[in-house]
Amino acid sequence: MSKLPRSFYMRDDVLQITRELLGKFLVTRFRDVITSGMITEAEAYAGVIDSASHAHKGRRTNRTEIMYATGGTAYVYLCYGVHHLFNVVTNEKDIPHAILIRGLEPVEGIETMLRRRKMKSLSPSLTSGPGSLSKALDIQVKHTGTDLLGDKIWIEDRGVKIPSSKIVRTKRIGVEYAGEHAHLPYRFIIKGNKWITKSPFNKSESGNLKTR
């Protein structure tokens, strides 16, 4: 069990990093309470050339400036004024690649996660979907800019290897505004895992999936 090094995040292939995040473990420690889950679903955003990215065409705002930070930094933003969405910034400084973590299979601190989500029993809705997992792990907008090599939020390699036959690619969810880029297969999921966002693209028989 080891924390991912800076070098993992500093590479230039955001799709490869996204794929490799499947099977890794997202961990939070707040007020000495640890919660964690295995990453089951993630989406890549390729910066200035990606119409679905907040940094498309080099856009820089108070919110998105953190996307231009050194790889291995958290980018957390508020969606619809309600959901705190956790992203991993990758690549070199000033290249705004990011990866949205969309699903986790809960591992540690499940009772704490249930309380945070006001749920009585364990079900996939606990941590499937980016807003749900952030609430379960208590990740908030105030954590944007957090160094993922620190002691509050980090990602670990626990030796889980997801075979290529179990990794599926689809188009991203909720980016219809991105035109032709909305159809890019930049979403990666673990095939057959129930801890992923409910989506019409989850079933291989739909014809929208590609195994990679």
Image (spheres, rainbow, N blue to C red):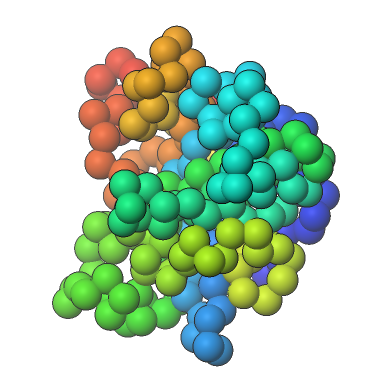
The vertical placement of 54 against 64, above or below, is: above
The vertical placement of 127 against 79, above or below, is: below
Task: Give the position of the C terminus as an image quadrant.
Answer: top right
The vertical placement of 193 against 204, above or below, is: below
Does the image show residue 42?
yes
Does the image show residue 21?
no
Q: Is residue 90 left or right of residue 180?
A: right
Q: Nearer the viewer, residue 127 or 48?
A: 48
Q: Residue at x 52, y 54 (%)?
A: 76
Q: Residue at x 47, y 75 (%)?
A: 35
Q: In the current view of this chain or complex, which residue is farthest to the bottom? A: 32
Q: Is residue 85 left or right of residue 50?
A: left
Q: Where residue 133 sits in the image (x, y, percent)?
A: 39, 60
Q: Where residue 176 sits in the image (x, y, percent)?
A: 35, 21
Q: Residue at x 46, y 65 (%)?
A: 140
Q: How many marks?
A: 0
Q: Where residue 13 sits in the image (x, y, percent)?
A: 72, 30
Q: Nearer the viewer, residue 160 or 148?
A: 148
Q: Is residue 204 left or right of residue 94?
A: left
Task: Give the position of the N terminus as an image quadrant.
Answer: bottom right
